[in-house]
Image (tube, rainbow, N blue to C red):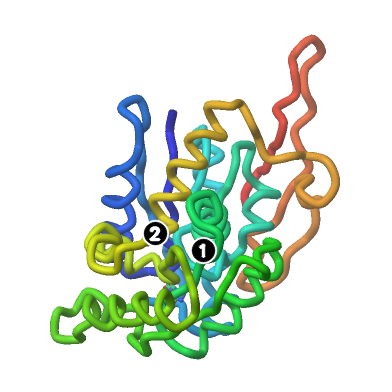
Amino acid sequence: MHLRVINPNTTRAMTDLVGRAARGVAGPGTLVDAVQPTMGPASIESHYEEALAVPGLLEQVALGEAEGVDGYVVACFGDPGLDAARELARGPVLGIAQAAMHAATMVARRFGIVTTLGRTTGRARELVDRYGFAAACTGVRACEIPVLALEDPASGARDRVAEHCRRAVDEDGADAVVLGCAGMADLCADLSDRVGVPVLDGVAAATVLVQGLVTLGARSSTRGEYAPPPPKAMAGLLAGFEVRAPAPVPAGERPAQRQHARV
Ligand code: 2AL
């Protein structure tokens, strides 16, 4: 099985980090590669950056489809471009927020989210509502540590994230904590020990879940909203993202489930 973890920001160190987190939980027969877009923001902590990260992310999905990738993880807590990626991909595509929230409710009744900057908490709450976890979520806490400072030992990230995890438990009533940034993936095991409740990293959760879905033979649905996007002209900088009609299938051959000339 070939899984691809896509870090939607363009910082190589974060791509390496999410690749390690995913490989740490992948099964022996699973190949995991970690990629990042060729264009886009260095980190995603605003709606503007999230929007601009999506074309480069979709380009990586289109390349993965050409290579026969079986399933994808979108490794950013805003789950950017998730619906669009599912329109392009044959196999399942999981966002780390959706995966971590599902995993949390399988091991605890109520979970809190601990994320980076206060300005990203609105998006996290929106996803809690969208995925149907409003009753299970005790709240979203921000450590006010920028994404790219998480790896800087001088930022005190480890202690500050731990402190907010503790407060999510002690003050908000959470029985588990979901980490609200892919850049926190390597803090997860240590935090579970320190805080004494399950602390879930979405990169690992999504990798395990997407691997399970591929094993089940579950693909992205091609009916309704996740059907391939209609062929259409694209103008300007996005001209290369044009979706063209599938090539005609020779008589007697089974049509591919999805065919895209380019994203
Ligand atoms: C993220 C994340 O997971 N990756 C990124 O660039 N920004 N999320 C966040 N809440 O800051």
Q: Secondary structure at mark 2?
A: loop
Instruction: In this rendered view, identify the residue nearer to me: 225 or 64.
Output: 225
Above or below 209: residue 133: below
Query: Mark 2 CB in 8 Å range of ligand 1?
Result: no
The structure residue drawn at horizontal position 46% and vertical position 65%, both measured from the top left corner, is 175
Q: Is residue 160 left or right of residue 238?
A: left
Indicate the amino acid at tag 1.
Gly
Q: Nearer the viewer, residue 241 or 152?
A: 152
Tell me the element at label 1: helix
Pick the front one: 23 or 251: 23
Q: Residues within 10 Å of mark 1 (few under 14, many from 20)?
A: many
The N terminus lies in which quarter of the figure?
A: top left
- Mark earlier in primary sequence (1, 2): 1
> In the image, what residue type sits under mark 2?
Asp
Q: CA distance from mark 1 to mark 2?
A: 24 Å
Q: Which mark is residue 201?
A: 2
Q: Counting other residues with Cα less than 10 Å from the Cα at mark 2, is it few (<14), some (14-19), or many (20 or more)?
A: many
Residue 187 horizontal/vertical position (percent): 26, 65
Q: Residue sitting at 74 percent across and 47 percent down?
A: 244
Disc number placed over residue 238 in the picture, else none: none
Which quadrant holds residue 238? bottom right
Residue that badge 1 annotates: 56
Q: Look at the numbered discs 1 and 2 and tell me whether their residues touch, using CB distance below 8 Å.
A: no
For residue 165, which quarter of the picture? bottom left
**Residue 73: image location, x then y, percent:** 48, 50
The percent position of residue 94, horizontal first and vertical second, equals 55, 50
> Residue at image x 39%, y 65%?
182
Task: Indicate the position of residue 46 as horizontal and vertical percent values.
Answer: 52, 85
Residue extending furthest right? 224
